[in-house]
Amino acid sequence: MTVPSLLAALAPRRIVVFRALQLGDMLCAVPALRALRAAAPAAQIALIGLPWARAFVERYAALVDELIVFPGAVGFPEQPETDDGLPAFFARMRDRRFDLAIQLHGSGGVANDLLHRLGARADAGFVQPDEATREGCFIDWPDALPEPERYLALMSALGAPVHDRRLTFPLTAPDLDEFAALRAYHGIEDERLVLIHPGSQLPSRRWPAERFAAVADHLAADGWQIAITGTAAETPLTGTVLGAMSAPALHLAGATSLGALAALTAHARLVVCNDTGISHIAAAMATASVVIACGSDTRRWAPLDHARHRVLADYPACRPCMFRDCPYGHPCALNIGVDEVVETAREQLARAPGAQAGAPGSLHEGSVSLFFEDLHHAA
């Protein structure tokens, strides 16, 4: 006799997913959320996330119905590390009477304790090797898998078949309008456009600004149009890159919403960046990239398409890094040279037949195709 999956047995009407993380982390969970929605199309799915994720829920309204802001807790550094707001938070969650609570936050431990206190009929998630057995659907943390595949493994265990592993980023009509205005104002030329994105949330994850500037100068000399991108908070860093350059470049840091940045990425020929959120946007938009991965676990975070997205990394003994600021002189960053990045960028730009500065190639056309396909699905 076939044992029904937890999803089949519960037939849940109210599901809550805990993943209180930043943009890149959330994009990596999109394939799992897509599988969950396909398996429970009539369920109300809530996300417990960070305040910024309201924009994520609005963009992925086909996958998630609402955001519940996580108040923060000790052991969760993305929010103030205090348990003061938890009693009232858990009381509200228990009043919601969720049928299923899913822990997509990480490997287990304290995240599972938090999940259990939501009071759902059943729980699901991951457990660490030394963690006690938990009731519900819990699987061993699949440490050897890339990040998106870890959460798809849990979906499979729950009984949610995986039919689509793509990262996607739906674009909306306002995104298109903002990008069109940006292109007209700055004279952006899609067929020549290369994005240089020097920022990252943690300083330990950043390749030196002057090296980004040197790469940008080399590519500008080849005939590519350079645009420096980043958030408004990163303008001192992006300004440093621009100031260290000899060639002219567009300074677009703080000039785009997230949606317009994704549209810009979709139209670019190449993105050169750190291992940060825009790397996952490039993967979602099928735009070629060169990712300089400092400190991060490349086995976990590297894009799955190793041809379209080239990851450059050095592996000192201290890697993967858990520090905000490197205490060892930052060898994982400094051991990646400008020449290596420039050579890899040129290889990426030349991959498509006939690809050269001023001549659109198939990689760019593919990203525009996905761009409009996603807009169609978002409409």
Image: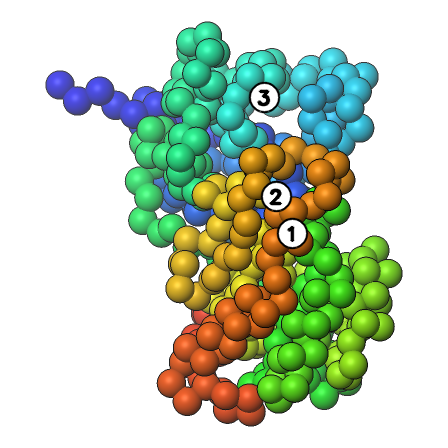
**What residue occupies the far bottom of the structure in this picture?**
358
* Disc 2 secondary structure class: loop
Q: Which residue occupies 51% across, 25% down? A: 107
Tag 3: residue type? Answer: Ala
Q: Mark 2 points at which residue?
A: 295
Q: Which mark sits nearer the N-terminus, 1 or 3? A: 3
- In the current view of this chain or complex, which residue is farthest to the left? 1
In which quarter of the view is residue 214 placed? Answer: bottom right
Counting from the top left corner in percent of width and height, residue 13 is at 46, 30
Query: What's the image's color scheme?
Result: rainbow
Q: Which of 307 and 327 is in front in this view?
A: 327
Q: Earlier in the sequence, mark 2 or mark 1?
A: 2
> Residue visible at 65% across and 86% down?
221
- How many marks can you see? 3
Tag 2: amino acid: Gly
> If you read the primary sequence from the N terminus, does the residue marked by circle 2 or circle 3 appear first?
3
Determine which residue is flagged by label 1: 333
Q: Is residue 270 left or right of residue 72?
A: left
Location of residue 61 in the rendering, given as x and y in whole percent from the top left corner: 56, 50
Give the number of the disc on residue 349: none
How far across and how far down the image is residue 310, in percent?
48, 61
Could you give the CA–CA distance between mark 2 and mark 3, rounded to whole angstroms? 24 Å
Q: Mark 3 points at which residue?
A: 111
Instruction: Find residue 354 and report its image quarter.
Output: bottom left
Q: Looking at the image, is mark 2 or mark 1 nearer the viewer?
A: 1
Query: Secondary structure beneath disc 1?
Result: helix
Check whether the beta carbons of the residues at disc 2 and disc 1 lie within 8 A of each other. yes
User: Disc 1 residue type?
Assistant: Ala
As helix, strand or loop, the secondary structure at mark 3 comes to helix
